[in-house]
Amino acid sequence: MIHVTIAMHGMLAQSLIESIEMLVGDQQGVSAFTLCPEDDAAVFRAEIATDIVAARDRDEEIIALTDILAGTPFNSVCAVEGCAEFIHVTGVNLPVALGIVANREGRRARELVDEALEDAPSSLLDVTGFGQRARSSPREGSDDDE
C-alpha cells in the first residue's frame, strides 16, 4: 500500500482528505498535518517525521503532498527526507490529491506521481463565461434545439 502524508497551511490538509472521502469514500493510509499560526513548527515537523518513519517501518511506499513551494509545510517535509525514502509533490490541489489518493490500489508511488504531474495542468482552467455559455446553449433533447 502507498501511504500519503499531506502537510499544508491552515486546515487545508484535513479538508482535502474530507473532500476526497466525500467523493470516493473512506481512505486508509492517509495522514493530514495542519499548520496554524499558533502551532510550533518544530512540533509540526516532528509529527510529520513520526508519520513518515512509521510508514517506512511498515514497508509502505510514501508520497508527501504539500501546498506551497518553500512554505513551512514544504520545508518541514524536506527536513525529514533523511528519515525515509519518499516522493514529495508540492502545489497540490484537490484534483491532484484525489488522483493520487483514490488510485493507490495496485499501483507504484512513482507511477501515480508521474500520472498526477502529467494531468495537473488540466486541473487549472480559465472558465470565464462558462456558466453563461451553458445557459445560452440549447440542451440536447430539449425543445429548444428544434
Image (spheres, helix red, strand yellow):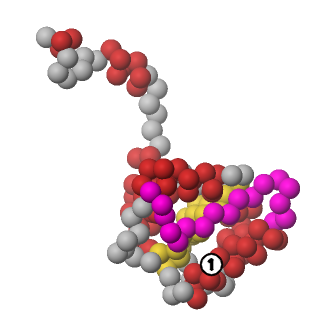
| Quadrant of residue 32 within the rendered picture | bottom right
Q: Name the residue under label 1.
A: 52
Q: Is mark 1 on a helix, strand or loop?
A: helix
The magenta stretch is: 25-41
Q: In which quarter of the image is the N terminus?
A: bottom left
Residue 70 shows in this picture: no
Residue 62 shows in this picture: yes
Image: 69 above or below 1:
above
Q: Is residue 32 magenta?
A: yes
Q: Along the horizontal axis of the image, is 36 left or right of 62?
A: right
Measured from the top left, where is residue 74 in percent x and y? 68, 64
Residue at x 65% of width, y 76% of height: 51
| Quadrant of residue 40 within the rendered picture | bottom right
The amino acid beneath tag 1 is Ile
Q: Along the horizontal axis of the image, is 80 left or right of 140?
A: right
Q: In which quarter of the image is the C terminus?
A: top left
